[in-house]
Amino acid sequence: MVTVDRQTFHQSKTFPFRVHNKLVQCIKPEVYIDPKAAQISGLDNKILEHQQVFKEVVSAVKAFLDSLPRPVCLLAHNGSRFDYPILRDELERAGALENLDIYCCDTIDAMKHILRGDSASCNKKGRNSFSLNALYSKLCGRRKNAHQAEQDCLDLMRVCHHDSKAFLEYIDSHAVRFTTHGIKKK
């Protein structure tokens, strides 16, 4: 996780931001990592076999999140379909979801909203691509160390900072409570 406070994000003219916080923790998965995901990330079950499982590091994750100034909003590219459900399930399984006062918003939706008027947005085989690679290439140049978690966070931060005012406006109007995100009402 890489964090930056709202004021720094909005007012900074340079990147990377001089003031930001990080929590970098490798975690041993309790399920088999798909070979395609392993190929992309360079991480597989064998490499991670001596790391701790999530429930053993959840207190560090919770302490990190609790140390941040409020409000806290988790941002992830395609997070609604991937990151948030996994993190929420792991936090719930570890008994750490209750009283978690954070929000979340999917950056892929934010960038689609911000760039939708730009017909040349990240063209990929005749259609618009809003992958992190395509957005970074269009807005910031060539990526280095793609698919390394910490670098992906920094690259996403840079893409979102491209139009910080529009990005913050989108987050303000679309962020939802993390604990209830994506939960279907019966």
Image: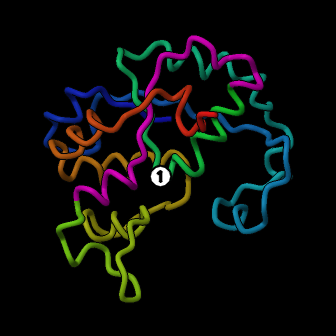
Helix or strand or loop: what does disc 1 sit on? helix
Residue occupying the point 46% across, 52% down: 77
| Residue 155: image location, x then y, percent | 38, 53
Q: Nearer the viewer, residue 110 or 27?
A: 110
Q: Is residue 70 above or below residue 179?
A: above
**Res. 61 image quadrant:** top right
Q: Nearer the viewer, residue 99 or 35?
A: 99
- The residue range painted magenta reads 92-114
Residue occupying the point 58% across, 45% down: 83
Q: Nearer the viewer, residue 15 or 77?
A: 77
Residue occupying the point 70% across, 62% down: 37
For label 1, the crowd category at 10 Å Cα-Cα, with few meaning under 14, some 14 to 19 and many 20 or more, is many
- If the image is split into quadrants, where does the C terminus sit? top right
Residue occupying the point 18% across, 71% down: 118
Q: Which residue is mark 1?
A: 152
How many numbered tags mark residues here? 1
| Residue 92: image location, x then y, percent | 71, 24
Magenta residue check for 107: yes
